[in-house]
């Protein structure tokens, strides 16, 4: 069977590329034929793949599998060795982060870039795979550093957009954390008005608040928190967060009628998430009392 050769050169990533290919072939038990030639500081790695018969319209499955694996080795080298310095350089130049800021938050940015939830690393890998497959359809030789400096500019842009998104997400999380810490601090300084506050879901958008004596909570004409003689006080969810934290000053919150949670709006779920973050273990869910199932 005739064969076709693909040759990869690298200076900066010689040890890493060699290690990746050796490891990949050992773990996957690949019939991948390759040779290495170290010329000074430059590693030349040659991959020998079966060449499809001239009558065939495309590469056979064995050839495509082997090409996929050596392309995957290149992708691993790019993502695990080249990307991090590029990300840190962007944090310094574009976002003007100091070395101390990068030291403290750089790993968090990298985690967000590579997290499964964001799909970032996989998404970049798929993009780079398409680019490399297209490249090797035209060329049989690739210099990793040269490719990244010139033809890989599009990949630079993909990475840059994901870095910007990761930084924005991190900043939003930091702002949310600061807000939660501020809420906790204010709550701790507020005088206790109701040691236990009960919250009951009434529907997708509304809740009721009542004291441990079973009386709905309201506000007096003077603006002070008080128990009311109204049988049920329904509050829009967007109107209750501030009163709960700053007006009623509870030390514990118990959530009732949790069977209504599947019907709850995103606004209600967001407020419940904030309360749970602020109160921690003092935000409890009622396992099911008589009041939970009253209409």
Image: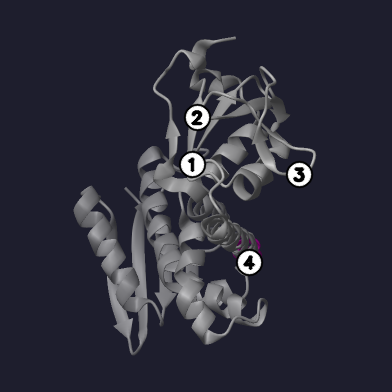
Q: Secondary structure at mark 2?
A: loop
Mark 3 in CB contact with mark 1 (< 8 angstroms): no
Farthest residue, direction top: 295
Q: Position of residue 13 (x, y in %)?
A: 38, 77
Q: Compared to 130, does 167 lie above or below?
A: below
Residue at numbered disc 3: 223
Residue at numbered disc 4: 160
Image quarter for residue 137?
bottom right
Residue at numbered disc 1: 195
Residue at numbered disc 2: 212
Q: Which tag, 3 or 1, sits closer to the chain's start?
A: 1
Asked if residue 141 lies left or right of residue 134, the reply is left
Q: Which tag, 3 or 4, sits closer to the chain's start?
A: 4
- Viewer-side residue, 49 vs 220: 220
Q: Which tag, 1 or 4, sits closer to the chain's start?
A: 4
Q: Residues within 10 Å of mark 1 (few under 14, many from 20)?
A: few
Q: Residues within 10 Å of mark 2 (few under 14, many from 20)?
A: few
Q: How many marks?
A: 4
Asked if residue 122 lies left or right of residue 25, the reply is right
Mark 3 in CB contact with mark 4 (< 8 angstroms): no
Mark 2 in CB contact with mark 4 (< 8 angstroms): no
In terms of secondary structure, what is the magenta stretch mainly?
helix
């Amino acid at each position: 069977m005739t064969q076709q050769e693909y040759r990869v050169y690298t200076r900066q990533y010689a040890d890493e590329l060699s290690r990746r290919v050796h490891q990949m072939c050992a773990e996957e038990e690949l019939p991948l034929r390759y040779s290495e030639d170290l010329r000074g500081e430059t590693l030349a790695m040659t991959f020998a793949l079966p060449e499809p018969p001239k009558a065939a319209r495309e590469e056979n499955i064995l050839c495509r599998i082997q090409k996929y694996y050596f392309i995957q080795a290149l992708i691993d080298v790019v993502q695990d060795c080249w990307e991090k310095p590029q990300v840190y350089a962007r944090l310094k130049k574009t976002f003007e982060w100091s070395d101390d800021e990068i030291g403290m938050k750089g790993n968090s940015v990298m985690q967000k870039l590579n997290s499964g939830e964001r799909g970032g690393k996989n998404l970049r890998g798929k993009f780079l795979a398409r680019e490399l497959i297209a490249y090797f359809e035209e060329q049989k030789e690739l210099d990793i550093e040269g490719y990244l400096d010139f033809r890989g500019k599009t990949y630079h842009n993909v990475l840059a957009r994901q870095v910007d998104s990761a930084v924005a997400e991190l900043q939003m999380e930091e702002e949310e954390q600061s807000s939660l810490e501020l809420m906790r601090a204010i709550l701790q300084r507020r005088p206790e008005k109701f040691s236990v506050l009960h919250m009951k879901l009434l529907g997708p958008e509304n809740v009721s608040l009542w004291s441990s004596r079973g009386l709905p909570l309201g506000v007096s004409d003077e603006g002070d928190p008080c128990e009311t003689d109204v049988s049920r006080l329904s509050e829009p969810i967007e109107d209750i967060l501030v009163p709960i934290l700053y007006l009623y000053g509870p030390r514990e919150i118990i959530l009732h009628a949790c069977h209504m949670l599947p019907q709850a709006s995103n606004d209600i779920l967001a407020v419940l998430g904030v309360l749970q973050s602020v109160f921690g273990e003092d935000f409890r869910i009622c396992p099911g009392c008589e009041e939970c199932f009253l209409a």
